[in-house]
Amino acid sequence: MAGPIRVVVAKPGLDGHDRGAKVVARALRDAGMEVIYTGLHQTPEQIVEAALQEDADGIGLSILSGAHMTLCAKLLELLKERDALDIVVFAGGIIPDADIPQLGKLGVARIFTPGATTHEIVAWVRANVGES
């Protein structure tokens, strides 16, 4: 039997607002998942390293800085280089609707925009991250 779903929740880039990331991290934890919160101002390299060290099933990114295209592209490139594309990447934050299909093409499995509930996020992670 597999253990609980393990998720790294990260704040990439220079954005200093982490309330949403902490709310999501707490909701995932309260739902029985193991959550590793990396803190503010993480580079894509630091996030990928944390996910590999923690044997994470998923990476949840909180991005409010407007740099989502660059940050997600770099993170997914690093996962590919490390042969770790089995780690499911999802993101939330202020992300324009027009960018969501492009992020999907890059490999971001799901984007949660403002107004998404913690119940919705938990249910999606349960259904799409880790062993089913």
Image: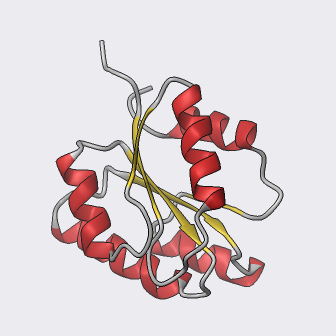
**Residue at 26% across, 69% down:** 46
**Residue at 27% across, 63% down:** 48
Is 83 placed left or right of 106 in the picture? left
Picture quadrant of residue 70: bottom left
Picture quadrant of residue 77: bottom left
State which quarter of the image contains the C terminus: top left
Q: Position of residue 113 (x, y in %)?
A: 74, 64
Is 95 placed left or right of 87 in the picture? right
Taking 121 as reference, is 44 above or below it? below
State which quarter of the image contains the N terminus: top left
Q: Position of residue 38 (x, y in %)?
A: 37, 58
Taking 39 as reference, is 12 above or below it? below
Q: Which residue sits furthest right?
A: 115
What sort of colour scheme is used for the picture? secondary structure
Instruction: Give the number of callouts.
Output: 0
Q: Position of residue 121 (x, y in %)?
A: 66, 44
Q: Which residue sits furthest top?
A: 1
**Residue at 66% across, 58% down:** 20
Q: Position of residue 95 (x, y in %)?
A: 69, 77
Taking 118 as reference, is 43 above or below it? below
Is 24 placed left or right of 69 in the picture? right
Q: Nearer the viewer, residue 23 or 75?
A: 23
Taking 1 as reference, is 121 above or below it? below
